[in-house]
Image (spheres, helix red, strand yellow):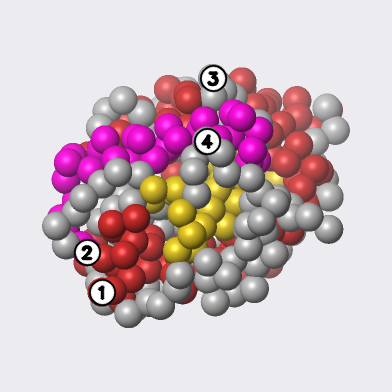
Amino acid sequence: MKYKPILIVAGEPNSIFLEIFFKSLKKKIKSPLILVASFNLVKLQMQKLKIKKKIKLLDKKKFTNNKLNNKFINLIDIDYNPKKAFEKITSKSNSYIKKSFDVSFNIIKEKKVSKFINGPINKKTFLNKNYLGITEYISKKFNIRKNAMLIYNKNLSVCPVTTHLPLKSVSKKINKKNIILKVKLIDEFYKKKIRKKPKIAILGLNPHCESIDRFNEDEKIIQPTVKYLKKHNFKVSGPYSADTIFLKNNRKKFDVILGMYHDQVLTPLKTLFEYDAINITLGLPFLRISPDHGPNEDMLGKNKSNPLSLIKAITFLDKN
């Protein structure tokens, strides 16, 4: 059986990503890994972290998948000349990150690769105010308007209806259309990749699904949407109160918990599983995953970062 390659963009150069990438190479992966990063940066960080592995440079336009294996670091070099292995995160690396993504997207569009992982970026410096997050950035590059951010664990996954919005803006985006879209994307993904129809719990927006305001989103929007989805054969129920849904006897009834905003579902999931989760963008014409962590400047060069989330991302794509 021939395994399709996994394309990996290192992302922010001053992050822990290359460290955990080097650590993940110890796992037996059948799919060839192709790293998109600066050769100079990779060499500097390998020296700093005392990593010994041969690098095989690939031509971004001419490489073929036939002779690739993981005996080497298969590298597509992106021009970047750091003065040292780790520096402070600034906007100076923006052009390098953008070029890394652009090269990768071209490879995907040429149908050479359909499995993609990106390392973390700094939202403030790279995305600025143009995009809510990297999910939206990648979706825009492929003209995809309908997407969802699924934080996946085989025991329990979560999906926020809104992603990186300020809390004061969340209620404006809670509507029937957005909730239905997320449920449909989750249902399609689980049936296609996990081979099951998921049981989805839908959370309320307000504490205990109650509100002292005249307009209660849980009663006026979420509850009718749940009824609509049930009538259309989706395995959904709710709205549930967010403060109790993650209790053991409650969460074990579901495959996915759909929350109304980012921290409502990501905070408890990360508390439960820590690094044992991956971020999957639903709705793209290819599989895109990122490890569920940021650049983590405080840990740069210490060689103590946990590679589990990246390993989970790679192994998931290796099996799909």
Q: Is residue 98 magenta?
A: yes
Q: Are marks 1 and 2 in contact (CB under 8 Å)?
A: yes
Q: Nearer the viewer, mark 4 or mark 3?
A: 4
Q: Earlier in the sequence, mark 1 or mark 2?
A: 1
Q: Nearer the viewer, residue 226 or 180?
A: 180
Q: Where is residue 17, by image quadrant?
A: bottom left
Q: Are marks 4 and 3 in contact (CB under 8 Å)?
A: no
* Magenta segment boundaries in residue numbering: 85-114
Task: Specify the label residue 85 is tagged with.
Answer: 2
Q: Secondary structure at mark 2?
A: loop
Residue that carries the numbered disc 1 in the rendered image? 48
Q: Nearer the viewer, mark 2 or mark 3?
A: 2
Does residue 164 sit above or below 36 in this rendering? above
Q: Nearer the viewer, mark 3 or mark 1?
A: 1
Q: Secondary structure at mark 4?
A: loop
Where is residue 266 shown, x and y percent of the image? Answer: 47, 53
Question: Disc 4 to disc 3, how far (Cα)?
Answer: 23 Å
Q: Earlier in the sequence, mark 4 or mark 1?
A: 1
Q: Earlier in the sequence, mark 4 or mark 3?
A: 4
Residue type at mark 2?
A: Ala
Label 2: few (<14), some or many (≥20) within 10 Å? some
Task: Specify the label residue 61 is tagged with.
Answer: 4
Residue type at mark 4?
A: Lys
Question: Disc 2 to disc 4, how far (Cα)?
Answer: 28 Å
Label 3: few (<14), some or many (≥20) within 10 Å? few
Task: Inspect this view and state whether residue 245 appears.
Answer: no
Magenta stretch, main secondary structure, is helix
Q: Earlier in the sequence, mark 3 or mark 1?
A: 1
Q: Quadrant of the N terminus?
A: bottom right
Where is residue 148 shown, x and y percent of the image? Answer: 57, 35
Question: Disc 2 to disc 3, how far (Cα)?
Answer: 35 Å
Q: Is residue 87 magenta?
A: yes
